[in-house]
Image (spheres, grey):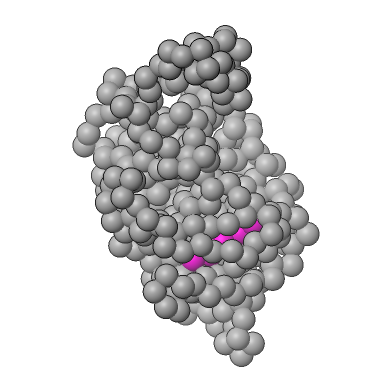
């Protein structure tokens, strides 16, 4: 039996702190919130619809500390949504002052700031200004030489890591005086200069180990490690240990990875155009690729073949549209749980995570199980 597709397509997803409510964008300008208390998606119910953006939503992030949702869109705007009543959300427009589309959005861990990637080579760092009663964007102007495609925060709320289509990944200071209490970098052992760390927008590190645009970048839970993936099918792991910055690059034979996330400081999950999550582990001296989690051995994805003439004709055009398959009415279903590119990963615990895909599925994964 096939695992049912949740929607026709999903561009991004995010969970609340209790992991019982899910926000997704069905590749449109809207954001839908579902009550997802059960792992069976047939029991999920839509409880709210966030409408405000004028173009396709590119990012959703649900902050667990403040229970606020931040969304970005190709309309060059961002919204902060707060729940006023049960299943009723009030939007606050954030004027980003960017000339091109917003590409991604990410809350700081404490919920006081959020960063927005953009096609205007800038990164707005937004914080709430009490005196003006509005969200104010402070701009990192020299964030790169091209579009910023991915951003993430360090656990101490002081730094962001950003990757773009200029093939480089950078770490910037996002310290804002009056918003952040203090700027301490003692645990980095000199790998990050304390004076530069206190200067907003200062580029602290720059990495050019990828020969393709940066698909995704993330900090580890401790903030002492980071990882980013390139469109050249490389996975890059960095570290601030020992007072110096080092980067290890793994070159893959498979297709590029579009998203990456730390499960723990020594375990990483990545996924992308191969349609399967891939596991990486740190063995004490270097990072090692352990292989795909979904091998296709226990796949429930393959549906029964339709034997009618109409079904075969319909499958022919469907396969051409989804897979570029011109082989007629043959079954082009992949032997994996996902049937298209995985575009987002959200970690729930040190063993469990969820993925969303262009195929319209949101799937649960457990590292202790085989797929």
Which residue is rendered at x = 53% and y = 57% of the image?
31
Residue at point 74%, 48% (across, down):
145
- Number of marks in picture: 0
**Front in this rendered view, residue 331 or 168:** 331
Q: Which residue range is magenta in the image?
A: 69-73
- Whether residue 363 is visible, yes or no, is yes
The picture places residue 121, in percent across and down from the top left corner, at 72, 53
343 to 305, vertically: above or below: below
- Give residue 291's position: percent from left, percent from top: 35, 26
Q: Residue furthest bottom?
A: 131
| Side (left or right) of 15 relative to 312 | left
Residue 72 is inside the magenta segment: yes
Residue 270 is situated, as x and y percent measured from the top left of the image, at: 43, 37
Residue found 46% across the figure and 64% down from its top:
48
Against 188, is 226 above or below?
A: above
Q: Is residue 219 left or right of residue 44?
A: right
The part of the image, by quadrant, that contains residue 322 is top right
């Amino acid at each position: 039996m096939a695992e049912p597709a949740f929607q026709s397509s999903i561009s991004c997803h995010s969970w609340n702190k209790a992991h019982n409510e899910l926000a997704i964008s069905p590749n449109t300008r809207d954001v839908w919130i579902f009550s997802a208390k059960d792992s069976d998606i047939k029991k999920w119910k839509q409880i709210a619809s966030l409408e405000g953006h004028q173009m396709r939503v590119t990012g959703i992030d649900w902050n667990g500390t403040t229970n606020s949702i931040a969304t970005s869109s190709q309309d060059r705007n961002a919204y902060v949504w707060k729940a006023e009543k049960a299943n009723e959300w009030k939007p606050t427009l954030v004027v980003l002052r960017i000339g091109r589309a917003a590409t991604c959005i990410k809350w700081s861990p404490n919920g006081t700031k959020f960063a927005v990637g953009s096609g205007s080579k800038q990164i707005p760092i937004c914080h709430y200004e009490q005196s003006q009663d509005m969200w104010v964007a402070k701009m990192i102007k020299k964030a790169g030489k091209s579009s910023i495609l991915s951003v993430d925060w360090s656990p101490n709320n002081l730094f962001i890591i950003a990757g773009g289509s200029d093939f480089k990944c950078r770490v910037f200071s996002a310290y804002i005086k009056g918003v952040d209490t203090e700027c301490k970098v003692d645990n980095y052992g000199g790998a990050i200069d304390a004076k530069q760390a206190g200067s907003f927008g200062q580029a602290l590190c720059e990495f050019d180990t990828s020969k393709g645009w940066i698909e995704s970048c993330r900090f580890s839970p401790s903030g002492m490690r980071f990882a980013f993936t390139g469109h050249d099918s490389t996975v890059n792991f960095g570290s601030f240990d020992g007072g110096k910055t080092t980067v290890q690059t793994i070159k893959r034979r498979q297709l590029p990875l579009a998203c990456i996330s730390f499960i723990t400081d020594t375990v990483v999950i990545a996924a992308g155009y191969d349609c399967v999550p891939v596991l990486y582990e740190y063995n004490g001296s270097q990072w090692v690729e352990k292989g795909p989690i979904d091998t296709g051995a226990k796949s429930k994805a393959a549906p029964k073949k339709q034997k009618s003439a109409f079904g075969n004709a319909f499958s022919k055009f469907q396969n051409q549209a989804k897979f570029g398959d011109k082989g007629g009415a043959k079954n082009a279903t992949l032997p994996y749980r996902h049937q298209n590119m995985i575009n987002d990963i959200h970690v729930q615990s040190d063993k469990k995570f969820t993925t969303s895909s262009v195929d319209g599925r949101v799937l649960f994964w457990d590292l202790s199980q085989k797929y």
